[in-house]
Image (cartoon, grey):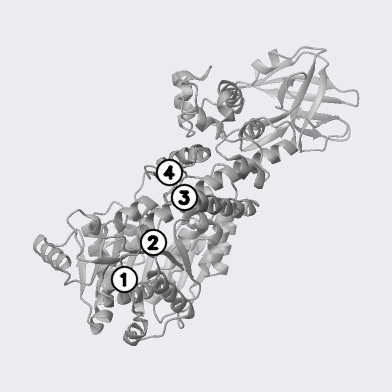
Amino acid sequence: MTVSTDMPIRFIKGVGERRSEQFARLGVNTAGDLLRFFPRGYEDWSAVMSIQEALYHEACCIKGTALSKPVEYRVRKGLTLYKFSVSDGSAIMKVTLFNNKYAAAKIRAGEEYLFFGQVGGDFTHREMSSPMIEPAGDGQRIRPIYRQTEGLNTRFIETTVARCLEMLDAELDNDPLPLSIRQDYELCTRRFALSNIHFPVDSKALAIARKRMVFEELFILQLGLLRLKSRSRSSNTAIITKDNTIDFLSLLPFSLTRAQSRTLSECIKDMQGKHPMNRLVQGDVGSGKTAVAAGTAFTVIKNGFQAALMAPTEILAEQHFKSLTTLLEKGGICVGLLTGSQPVAEKRKTLEALASGNIDLLIGTHAILSDGVEFNRLGLVVTDEQHRFGVAQRAKLAAKGSNPHLLVMSATPIPRTLALIIYGDLDISVLDELPPGRLPVKTYAVGSDKRERAFYYVKKHIDQGRQAYIVCPLVENGEESDLASATEYAEILSQGLFKGYSLGLLHGRVKPSEKDRVMSSFVKNEISILVSTTVIEVGVDVPNAVIMVIENAERFGLAQLHQLRGRIGRGRYKSTCILISDAQNEEAVRRLKVLCSTNDGFKIADEDLKLRGPGDFFGNRQHGLPDLKIADLLGGDMPLFKAAQDAARELLAVDPFLKQPQHHALAQEINCLFEQVGEQGLN
């Protein structure tokens, strides 16, 4: 077995098959993974305090001599205490261990130990409960604390990391960062960084090591994204020679906002350049992204090319088809529709018209990606980022033409700092204002004791001809008994307060055809109340829906609640969102307060990021990029991100394909990183 970072972790002494399975639960499969499994925190055993000076209820390290061996006390079945006293000359401290016979057996009277924990007691005595204990000669240093899983505690991980560093000693000198980069940005070697990120000599060494590892992580990520951008930016084969925006504006029954005009102008300018457009249009719910896409498609088509617009659901595709046909056919543009449920004959007719060039704009679902879909002269691809496409999927869609322009629309407001990372291969436009006349949604958080009152409020609006959503987090009983179930809930409502009213039910397990039928009925106002799970988060415009009740609101993330709320307030009527929650914990209460205080999706996204952190912001790596292991863009690492981005641009300007010998290790690191998320390397 070659000793390298690719070596399976089971070959490290003391790990074996069973432990390697436990490590795999933490995402650690190789020696290299283990070296990048950075501590989540540290315990400073090096700064020893005297018993007398120790602050109450703050973690600290005490060095003291055991005055006696521990005495066992059986309090009750299942609870045994071990008590002994410790002295360091300044005072005496009582130590209590709970159900820890193993630790108690190691204590010898007259021997010196380090005790790490919180000091309690009062002016008359000092005490420490369940401290971590080490012989005085072994543990006086800064010690790492790792994320754990069942069967693997932080001390075993610490020991395994130490063995791994020892085994890979020669490999540590194979530094992927060239000497010139390290010198320019004052970075230590990889050997020093990995040793001191896990086992810091002191706090200064830890800061130096962390700076190096954060820079390396962001530098390699930026190099990969910039290479993706350059790879997708071959020469522009769909050059736009004429800007047809004025003709497009004459078709609109309304005026564009300043943000829409600016973004549309940016898109046209991109398409007139040397490289294909590769742009993200990011805007809050209702900010008018579709109008920008339509204006971009109009100019592309008037320049002799075709365009494709991909929507996340069939019903949304149909809505786009109807609205854009009404708008664009006045300008002589033929719009086609392609969905999975279309009859075979209709689909064949659409595909033939598309291949011959008779369809100018094709609107559809992921069916557009099918092998049989061929364009005559595809110049623009517009995709809704609701799909959460990664960079590879975007490339697959663009392969339908010869380097067509790419426009990605995102209805999830993302803090700019995070967008720079996640969409590093795209240029970014932000729609930061809503069209005039759009009414803000009033939002209230109430306890379950106000539920009946909320429902009477819903009933009042339905009696006036309006419609409502009631959102539940679960589908059916048996998942968690304390939460409302959409299925049971709909049944209770239809037999109780809303008896005689038309109710619809929508959740993830409903068949697509039934889902479309229910949504279609709701759009036509054949259903007054739609009881649903979060599947309506991505939905259609129902201007008549003016009220939303969200049960167990604490179960949803801030961004998700904002997206749900965006289903209402889309017409000329005042709209209300009622959050029902009995949650008392501080974070849940703060989330709901934020939502009640603002309708600004970007402010909400910033709060969500603060509450959940970058790793959880998108959940389940939906953004299609590797997770950041150590960099924290909220905790002050943005200057390092900017430095890493500058360094990546400078390096690629000199060696765009990383072919120079000193850059081979970097190219390897980039390929490994992007292979993890299905990019198959960047060669």
Which quadrant is the N terminus positioned in? top left
**Mark 4, residue position:** 674
Examine the rendering and report whether any part of residue 308 can be seen: no
Q: CA separation, marks 3 and 2?
A: 41 Å
For label 2, the SS is helix
Mark 3 / mark 2, whichever is N-terminal: 2
Q: Amino acid at mark 2?
A: Glu
Query: Which residue is denoted by mark 3 in the rendering?
Result: 656
> Mark 2: few, some, or many residues within 10 Å (few <14, many ≥20)?
some
Which of pointers 1 and 2 indicates the residue nearer the eye? 2
CA–CA distance in space, label 3 to label 4: 17 Å
Q: Amino acid at mark 3?
A: Pro
Q: Which comes before the other along the chain, label 3 or label 1?
A: 1
Distance from the alpha carbon under mark 2 to that under mark 4? 30 Å
Q: Which residue is disc 1 drawn over?
A: 528
Q: Where residue 511 appears, x then y in whole percent?
A: 23, 54
Residue drawn 29% across and 61% down?
Answer: 313
Around disc 3, counting alpha carbons within 10 Å, would you say few (fewer than 14), some (14 to 19), or many (20 or more)? Answer: some
Question: Amino acid under label 1?
Answer: Ser
Of marks 3 and 1, the one in the foreground: 3
Count of all numbered marks drawn on residues in the image: 4
